[in-house]
Image (spheres, rainbow, N blue to C red):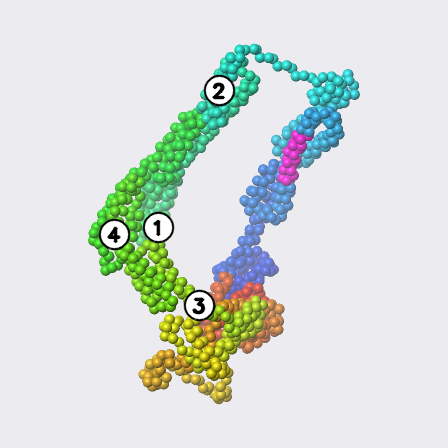
Amino acid sequence: MSSLKSHDTQALDTLTGGAFSAPTSGERAARLRDWLAGEPSAEQMQEVFRELSARDKGAARLLREKLDEIKRAKGQEAIAAEWAEKARGLLGQPRLNIADAMAWQRDAAKAGAPLSREPLASVKAELADRIRGIEDLQNRVQIQREAAVLLAQRIEVLSTKSWQDAQAAADALRNDVPAWQAQAQALLDDANWVSVDPKFPPLLEASRAQLQVVWDAFQSALAQAVAAAADANAALPPVPVWADELRQARGGPAEAAPPKAARPKADPEQRAHAGKVVGDALAKLEQEVAQGHGKATVGAANALRNALKEHGKLVDDKLEAQAHAALGAATELEGWQRWRADQLRQELVAKAEALFETVPAKPRKPARVKPGDGEAAPVATGEAVEAAPAEAAAQDLPATAEAVPAAAEPDDRPAPEAVAEAATPSGPAVRKPRYGGRKMQETLRSLREQWKQVDQGGPPNHALWKRFDEACNEAYKVVQEWLDKVKSEAAEHRTARLALIEEVKAWAAAHPDAPNGDWKGFNRALHQFSDRWREAGHLSEKAFAELQPQWKEAIGLAAAPLDRAQKQSIERRNAMIEEARALGDAPMLRIDAVKALQQRWQAEAQTVPLDRKQEQKLWDTFRKPIDDAFNRKTAEREKASAAMSGRDRAVLEASKAVEQATASGDAQKIRAALAALEQAVRARDDANAAAAPVGAKPAASPVDAATADGGAESATAEGAPAEGQEAAAPAAPPKPAPKPVVAMRGDDRPGARRAEPAMAARPGKFDSRRPGPGGRDMRDERRPFGRDRDDREDRGPRLGDAAFRAQRDALEHAQAALRKLAAQAHGEALTQLMTAWEQRSAEQVPSHQELGKAVGPQVRQGWTQALGKPAGGDASEALLRLEIAADVPTPADQITARRALQLQLLTRRNDPSPQETWGTDVAKVLATGYDANAARRLQNALKALLRGR
């Protein structure tokens, strides 16, 4: 298609497939994407962008990005050609420098060259192979050097063995040495040998020469040894071991070492004195060397040297050798300690100088100047910059902003403002202490101690000491300021603590007893005084030791009334503990007495506070006898009901069946097991029903009626009359459970009004305006409370603890499993619906029961009809309506369209809302072609809608 020269909108609209006439921005962008997929020319895209950028910048963004991509691709092609040419130049050189090749890759990446595309990808690979070959050559040179050293060592070791062993090993060496020479020559013949580092060729050449010399000498000596072994008159080889072996084979003696000159004879006393003097000096030097004392080591070494000069001819060889070895160790230690001491001193000087850090001053802000002040403002700013560098360095504030405050105020006049940016350089750097006062003091103390230790181990260094002392003195100024501040604060804290002591004394005189018996408030006030004393600030140890006794005396005097009240309260609580023990030891537990005693204890605890640990200890002692009594009562109950009834066994078996059904994961089995469990719970125990006929009223003793609380006592009281009546009257059959109402008679014609039962009012509730039950007419017919309890249905005995817990746990697990299965079925239905849409198969649409009650038969029929037709249409608006109905988020690129649709819906007041038409909207979406993004949006909306959101 040829390029368009005019900006005819109609022609451009035809060219882009209706992008200019599209009603919404979303449709315009979609049509532009379709047009760009046809790969139009850059000139056409430029003309469309020029016309569309003034109408819809959002849609024109697609064209701008495409044009930028084309421009960027052209620029990258030029850059790629340039760097490819540089790389070919490097590859064409006979000698390639590895640093230049690596710099090419780094610089090309910085310049934005596309290294992963051709032609740069190929030249990059060639450079990498060339560099890899050069590095491999260098590694092989080092390996060959090591191999040459090992071969030379093998030959030298053979010179210490028998010449016959050397002759046997010579054959292997005749193969290894030429092989090494051939490998070295292969390195020299490699094409990349000229590009290796210059230090490697001399190393390889030296290894070749050394190995050749050793090999030639070995061959010559071995040949001479073989000749000497064959001819007794031949000369012996120059190898001492081989020469001695051949000499012994000829029958001659081995060559003896030259005799050592004998020492002159001396007086034994002089020899012993000399040995003692040298031995003492040697022991002193060895001790100093072992301890590492540098200064003392020098003196001890000099003393030993003098002793050797004076008595060296009189001592034996062993002592002389020990003395020389000790002097060597001392000399080494002396040099090492001097170097190490200076190194440690330099480290300490660096640490001392690093106690202050240099902080650059903050840059000054540009000043805004009014037009009328065009000449005065710059002059004022310059003066301020010259006058205030010291203040800006000390206070870390911009000097320009302080000097010209009026220039920063906006001008209310309509004339435009002129902005004068004062090019003021930042002030001088500020030295700031790195640590605070206490940390600085501890650091200085540690540094000086380390310096003293270093001085003890080596000679002093005055230059380093001067630098170290100056840095420490400068840092100590910070410590001095901190100490002055601490002293002033300590004086203030001391004054505040003395005032607090006087305040406590005055309060104690004004409160000899708790006002209105409020001991809790009294105790709270004492705690507040203690908190104030604890937070009154730091004092030195001496000052605190002086004030602490005064504080204890004052607070003890103030707390004396509370101490007396607490002592009396403890006595009363001990008396209540004795009463509790008496109640717990009684054969019959009196609940009313226990409750009254507990109320007295609570009243006492709320009146007088005690220490928490002591109060808890007293409470544990008080409740122990009562808990023991209740535990005995519970044990008796459990003992009485230990025998499990038939109903409990049935409930346990039904609970186990529910657990098994829950583990299987089958919803039908779970519901059937739950129904069986409910039947077992409602059933009566046949043995109990036969033993306790309906209408029999047990008689309880007064003591049982007063003390029993619905437990084992009442059960025992019911059992006695039942056993007495068993012989007199036959057991009555159990009362059948009432059947639920399934249906009732009435007019069931379509449209007829059904009779609804009137809602009965709650019995006993008075209402004078309403006659009938609970109103004015029922006032005289009320019966006393509890009179109608005998008319209730007999629900049978209570379940045992084990059966009750088993059926409760089984119900909870089964209900949780049913909820989980329902959620899984819901998700599977949505997945099945998405699959039916993708395959355009109406048969795969989930059934009405699977979709839930939110989807009616007509809605489902509409979905199946939509899937039965060929795909077509646009689902964007239907998806937006579904997201509005479900109140779920919309993708970022569709938010603008959603807002526009919401505005349109506000104008259509009579149209049904998206919440009412979401079923039809789903059908519209299913009628279109399948799209992954649309399917995800539809599934998110249906998740909320099918739940009835």
Q: Earlier in the sequence, mark 1 or mark 2?
A: 2
Residue 280, label in figure: 2
From the image, tell me which residue sits under label 1: 417
Left or right? Give the position of 886 relative to 473.
Answer: right
Q: Is residue 137 magenta?
A: yes
Per the rendered image, the range of residues in magenta is 130-152
From the image, tell me which residue sits under label 4: 560
Q: How would you rate the neighbour count of disc 4 (Cα within 10 Å): few for under 14, some for 14-19, many for 20 or more?
A: some
Do tag 1 and tag 4 residues touch (Cβ < 8 Å)? no
Task: Please tell me whether mark 1 or mark 2 is closer to you in this view.
Answer: 2
From the image, tell me which residue sits under label 3: 636
Q: Position of residue 527 (x, y in %)?
A: 29, 52
**Amino acid beneath label 3:** Glu
Q: Position of residue 666 (x, y in %)?
A: 58, 70
Q: What residue is at 49 percent from the left and 19 percent from the top?
A: 304
Left or right? Give the position of 212 relative to 276.
Answer: right
Q: How would you rate the neighbour count of disc 3 (Cα within 10 Å): few for under 14, some for 14-19, many for 20 or more?
A: some
Q: CA distance from mark 2 to mark 3?
A: 94 Å
Quadrant hosting residue 398: top left
Q: Earlier in the sequence, mark 4 or mark 3?
A: 4
Q: What residue is at 48 percent from the left and 88 percent from the top?
A: 746
Q: Position of residue 781 (x, y in %)?
A: 34, 85
**Amino acid beneath label 4:** Ala
In what element is the residue under mark 1? loop
Q: What residue is at 55 percent from the left and 16 percent from the top?
A: 316
Task: Please tell me whether mark 4 or mark 3 is closer to you in this view.
Answer: 3
Q: Position of residue 242 (x, y in %)?
A: 72, 22
Q: Earlier in the sequence, mark 1 or mark 3?
A: 1
Q: Is residue 406 magenta?
A: no
Q: CA distance from mark 1 to mark 4?
A: 77 Å
